Image (cartoon, rainbow, N blue to C red):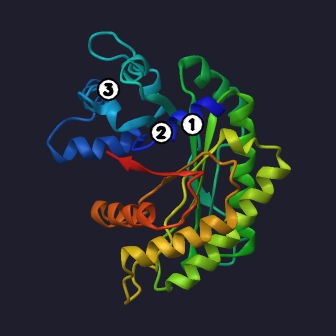
Amino acid sequence: LIATAAQIASAGKGILAMDESNATCGKRLDSIGVENTEAERRNYRELLITAPGLGEYISGAILFEETLYMDGNDGTPMVESLKKQGIIPGIKVDQGLVPLTGSPSGESWTQGLTGLKQRTEEYYKQGARFAKWRAIVDISAGPSEFAVTEAAYGLARYASICQASGLVPIVEPEILLDGEHDIDTTLAVAKNVWANVFKFLALNDVMLEGILLKPSMVTPGADHKVRPTPEQVASYTLDMLSSRVPPQVPGICFLSGGQSEMEATLNLNAMNQTPNRSKSTRLNSSHSQ
């Protein structure tokens, strides 16, 4: 677990998020007039993972379940094609968002804990070595302490189960950009969310050296009138991380969270350029295809 987490957090590399469901993949294919069939999904996914030199920039790839078990057109398993490039295969294991019963403002929670131990054991046998579970916190909907606790506890249970099956868990409580709130509100919510996450990780005896974090950057809501500079985002995000993340965590792979590629890149660059930031944890990125 420690070796896998360290390799994924390699300097100058990021994670390729290619865990689209078949339906979402179909939307991409439809946009170019291609039918959503297993053969065409194979062509699309094989095109991604066999790109020459991909392993120079990508250390891990998050796969959809179909892709994990899929062979390329020449019969080579997709997992083996990734390994040839030095890329560690991963797998999305949550089963999506559902309404959180009892939430006063219609919040959501992530389902998928039932049967997770059996599924993760099978994924490990198939070659996966890390996993992804997406939980969300919606500032525009409160957020309620109930929803924050549900998200944090679910992440901790998932992380514990994954480690027991040999998979490095990516811990991802995504704080949505929706809303008109300012950056100080986001910072306060983020600190509360991460405090809860690490509390429940500790209660579930999760080994921090064998996890990766996938946090949102601290920005104002998407509809807030004042847009921050990359330096401001870097300052707020590093403030949150330095006050919440234990030094044992080997790597942080940011999600763009609705930002444009340029905006997310500039913000990440500003974080890595900030003097006196902690060097013990690598700050990398998670790329969607």
Q: Secondary structure at mark 3?
A: helix
Q: Residues within 10 Å of mark 3 (few under 14, many from 20)?
A: few
Q: Using the rendered view, name the quadrant where residue 42 is placed.
A: top left
Q: CA distance from mark 3 to mark 2?
A: 33 Å
Image coordinates of residue 75 in percent, x first then y, are 33, 9
Q: Determine contact: label 1, label 2, CB under 8 Å.
A: yes
Q: Residues within 10 Å of mark 2 (few under 14, many from 20)?
A: some
Q: Residues within 10 Å of mark 1 (few under 14, many from 20)?
A: some
Q: Are marks 3 and 1 in contact (CB under 8 Å)?
A: no
The N terminus - image quarter: top right
Q: Which residue is mark 3?
A: 38
Q: Amino acid at mark 1?
A: Ala
Q: Residue furthest front?
A: 276
Q: In this rendering, would 33 be left or right of 166?
A: left
Q: Amino acid at mark 2?
A: Ser
Q: Is residue 71 above or below residue 21?
A: above
Earlier-in-chain disc, 3 versus 1: 1
Residue 109 position in % (x across, y down): 64, 59
Q: Which residue is mark 2?
A: 10
Name the element at disc 2.
loop
Q: Is residue 101 visible?
A: no
Determine the residue positioned at 54% across, 66% down: 276
Disc 1 element: helix
Q: Nearer the viewer, residue 112 or 186?
A: 186
Q: Which residue is mark 1?
A: 6
Q: Position of residue 127 (x, y in %)?
A: 53, 20
**Residue found at the far left of this picture:** 33
- Real-space Cα separation, disc 1 to disc 2, in angstroms: 6 Å
Q: How many marks?
A: 3
* Residue at x 58%, y 83% (from the top left corner): 185
